[in-house]
Amino acid sequence: MDKRSTFLNQRADDSLFYHLFDHLPGVSFFAKNTDFEIVCANLAFLERLGFHNETEIIGKTDYELFPRQLAENFRKDDQAVITSGEARLHIVELFFNPQGIPDWYITNKMPVFDHHKNIIGVMRKAFTVAWSAWLRTIIAAKMPSSEKIARCSNRASTKAGLKWRLTPHSRL
């Protein structure tokens, strides 16, 4: 058994490993079981939906939380991940921002496996497109030249599957 597996197998079931996401600004996270019920969520996701405690959202489905059209889109993506066992990365989708207004988010959905490699659910991590722009601004502030800013941003854009391109003369 490798070191990673040894470590993860040692952690307590209630260690709430996923709460690391509570400390990543602009990032929301949740996981659902194969009945599409939420089984865990970070604080950013809870607050976006007006909840204060994770227990308030456990067991709810998208149809209980979102307008029907959004819920149908989320369910379709979740079903595809659960059925195929393959991640869906860099999905650009509509979701609610902290003010309750629909906004564009970059989302990654991945299957959740049990110890026997059976799919037991789907997990989602998302951040706003605006957060991505904020991150580019932070990088730009730390980089000494506009050429380096453009190179760094363009590499990140390519890895994220996005289409933006900066030149040394672009305005951030």
Image (spheres, grey):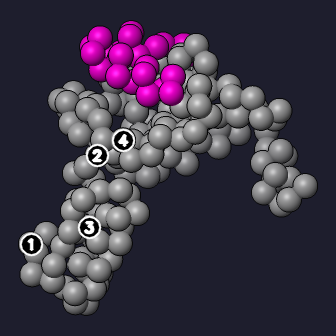
Magenta segment main secondary structure = helix
Classed neighbour count for the residue bearing mark 3: other residues with Cα under 10 Å, few (<14), some (14–19), many (≥20): some
Direction from residue 65 to residue 78 in the image, left or right: right
The span from disc 3 to disc 1 (Cα, nearest Å) is 11 Å
The span from disc 1 to disc 2 (Cα, nearest Å) is 20 Å
Can you identify the residue that label 2 sits on?
A: 128
Can you identify the residue that label 1 sits on?
A: 171
Choose mark 2 or mark 4, whichever is in front: 4
Q: Quadrant of residue 126?
A: top left
Q: Residue 36 in magenta?
A: no
Q: Earlier in the sequence, mark 2 or mark 3?
A: 2
Q: Give the amino acid type for the residue marked by disc 3 in the picture.
A: Arg
- Give the answer, above or below, for where 5 lies relative to 139: above
The residue closer to the viewer here, 89 or 37, is 89
Q: Determine which of the numbered discs, if any, sits on residue 91 in the image.
A: 4
- Give the answer, above or below, for where 73 lies relative to 97: above
Determine the secondary structure under disc 4.
Answer: strand
Classed neighbour count for the residue bearing mark 2: other residues with Cα under 10 Å, few (<14), some (14–19), many (≥20): many
Q: Earlier in the sequence, mark 1 or mark 4?
A: 4
Give the x, y percent position of residue 69.
Answer: 27, 15
Q: Give the amino acid type for the residue marked by disc 1 in the picture.
A: Arg
The span from disc 1 to disc 4 (Cα, nearest Å) is 26 Å
**Are dots 3 and 4 in contact, CB under 8 Å?**
no
The residue closer to the viewer here, 73 or 13, is 73
User: Magenta segment, which residues?
Assistant: 58-80
Q: Give the amino acid type for the residue marked by disc 2 in the picture.
A: Thr
Q: Earlier in the sequence, mark 3 or mark 1?
A: 3
Q: Residue 67 in magenta?
A: yes
